Image (cartoon, rainbow, N blue to C red):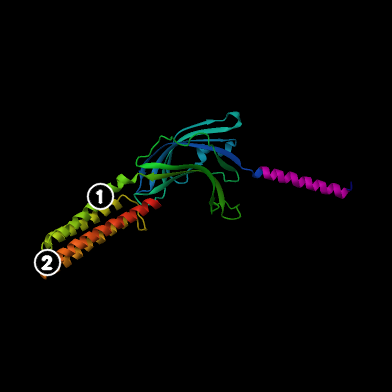
C-alpha cells in the first residue's frame, strides 16, 4: 500500500473519530419527569390566576442540573416548595418535590359562562439549555386523581408533553452568534369545561326579570303613561346595574362578549318598549284608543318572540362553539 493511500486512511479515521466524539458531546442528557396534581383551587377569574399543588419528580445522571436550585416555572406568580428529597444511589439522581404555585394565565371570556379554559403549567431548568438537557415524560400511572373535581368545572382533557421553548435573546451571553436560545420544557395542559347552567341563571335572571317588567307595560292601558314609563325606565336601570355586577367579576376584554350581547339586546328591546309606549300614548290622545290597544297587543307579542329568538340563537351559538 502506497504512502498516500495510508495517509488518506488515517485522515478518514481521524475524521470519523472526531465526528463521533463531537456527536457524543452534543447529545443532551435526558431528564425523566413526572407529575401528580393533588389540587387546583382559588381560581380567580378576574385576576387571571389560580393555585395548583402537585408532586414533581425527576430522574437523571448529571448532578450539575441541581433542580432544587435551578427549577424554573415560567408562568408562575409565586412558587412555594413545601417538601423535597434527593436519592443519589445507583449512579442516578432522583428528586421528589411538592410544590404549590400561583399561576398566571389568560382567560377566554367571549362565550362566558359557556366557556372552556386551558390551564397551563411549564417546568424548565434555568441554567441548562436544550443542548445540555432535554425532558422526557415519565408516563407510568396517572397524572392526577381521576376522582378529583374542581368546584364549578369539569376536567375535559389532561395532557403531559415536552417541548423546546425558544427565546429570542442571548440573556447577555456574548459567546452566542445570534440572540436566540432554546430550553427544553416539561408541560402540562388541562382543559376545563365550566358547569354553566346554574351560573347562567344566577347571573342573568335579574336581566330577564327586568325585561319582563318592561314587557308588562303592554298590558297597562296607554292612558296610564306614568305607570308605563316608570316600569320601563326602572327596568332599563336594572339591566344596566345587572351588567355592572357581572362585569365586575370578569377580566377586562376588548372583544364583544356574550354578556355584552345579551345585555345589549335587552337594553335595545326595553328602549323599543319605551318608543312604542310613546306612540301608543300619542294615538290614545288622538282618540284612537282601539288602534292603540291593537298596537300594544301586536307589538308586544312580536317583541317578545323576537327577543326570545335572539337570545336562543346567541346562547346556542356560544354553547356550540365553546
Residue drawn at x 15%, y 66% is: 292
Picture quadrant where residue 41 is located: top left
Work out how far the residue at label 2 is from the one at label 1, CA to CA, in angstroms. 35 Å
Callout 1: few (<14), some (14-19), or many (20+) C-alpha neighbours within 10 Å? few
Hey, which residue is sitting farthest right in the picture? 2
Residue drawn at x 81%, y 46% is: 10
Residue pointed to by mark 1:
205
Residue pointed to by mark 2:
289
Asked whether residue 22 is drawn in magenta, I would say yes
Tag 2 near tag 1, CB within 8 Å: no
Residue 205 picture location, percent across and down? 25, 49
Q: Main secondary structure of the magenta part?
A: helix
Hey, which residue is sitting farthest top in the picture? 89
Callout 2: few (<14), some (14-19), or many (20+) C-alpha neighbours within 10 Å? some
Q: Where residue 164 is drawn, which disc sits there?
A: none
Q: Nearer the viewer, residue 169 or 134?
A: 134
The residue tagged with tag 1: helix, strand or loop?
helix
Tell me: 195 left or right of 301: right
Q: Nearer the viewer, residue 118 or 103?
A: 118
Asked whether residue 135 is drawn in magenta, I would say no
The residue tagged with tag 2: helix, strand or loop?
helix
Residue 79 picture location, percent across and down? 43, 40
Residue 59 in view: yes
- What are the residue bounds of the magenta stretch? 3-24
Tell me: 63 left or right of 195: right
Amino acid at each position: 500500500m502506497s504512502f498516500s493511500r495510508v495517509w488518506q486512511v488515517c485522515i478518514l479515521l481521524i475524521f470519523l473519530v472526531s465526528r463521533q466524539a463531537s456527536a457524543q458531546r452534543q447529545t443532551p442528557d435526558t431528564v425523566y419527569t413526572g407529575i401528580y396534581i393533588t389540587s387546583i383551587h382559588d381560581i380567580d377569574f378576574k385576576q387571571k390566576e389560580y393555585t395548583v399543588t402537585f408532586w414533581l419528580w425527576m430522574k437523571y445522571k448529571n448532578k450539575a442540573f441541581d433542580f432544587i436550585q435551578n427549577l424554573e416555572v415560567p408562568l408562575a406568580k409565586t412558587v412555594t416548595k413545601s417538601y423535597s428529597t434527593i436519592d443519589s444511589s445507583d449512579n442516578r439522581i432522583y428528586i421528589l418535590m411538592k410544590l404549590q404555585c400561583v399561576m398566571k394565565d389568560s382567560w377566554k371570556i367571549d362565550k362566558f359562562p359557556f366557556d372552556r379554559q386551558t390551564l397551563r403549567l411549564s417546568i424548565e431548568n434555568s441554567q441548562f439549555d436544550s443542548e445540555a438537557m432535554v425532558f422526557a415524560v415519565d408516563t407510568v400511572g396517572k397524572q392526577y386523581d381521576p376522582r378529583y373535581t374542581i368546584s364549578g368545572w369539569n376536567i375535559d382533557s389532561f395532557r403531559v408533553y415536552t417541548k423546546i421553548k425558544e427565546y429570542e435573546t442571548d440573556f447577555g451571553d456574548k459567546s452566542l452568534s445570534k440572540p436566540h436560545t432554546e430550553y427544553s420544557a416539561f408541560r402540562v395542559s388541562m382543559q376545563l369545561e365550566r358547569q354553566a347552567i346554574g351560573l347562567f341563571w344566577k347571573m342573568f335572571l335579574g336581566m330577564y326579570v327586568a325585561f319582563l317588567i318592561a314587557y308588562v307595560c303592554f298590558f297597562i292601558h296607554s292612558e296610564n303613561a306614568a305607570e308605563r314609563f316608570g316600569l320601563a325606565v326602572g327596568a332599563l336601570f336594572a339591566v344596566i346595574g345587572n351588567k355592572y355586577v357581572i362585569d365586575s367579576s370578569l377580566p377586562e376584554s376588548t372583544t364583544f362578549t356574550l354578556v355584552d350581547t345579551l345585555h345589549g339586546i335587552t337594553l335595545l328591546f326595553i328602549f323599543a318598549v319605551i318608543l312604542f309606549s310613546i306612540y301608543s300614548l300619542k294615538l290614545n290622545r288622538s282618540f284612537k284608543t282601539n288602534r292603540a290597544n291593537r298596537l300594544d297587543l301586536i307589538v308586544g307579542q312580536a317583541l317578545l318572540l323576537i327577543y326570545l329568538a335572539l337570545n336562543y340563537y346567541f346562547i346556542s351559538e356560544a354553547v356550540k362553539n365553546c
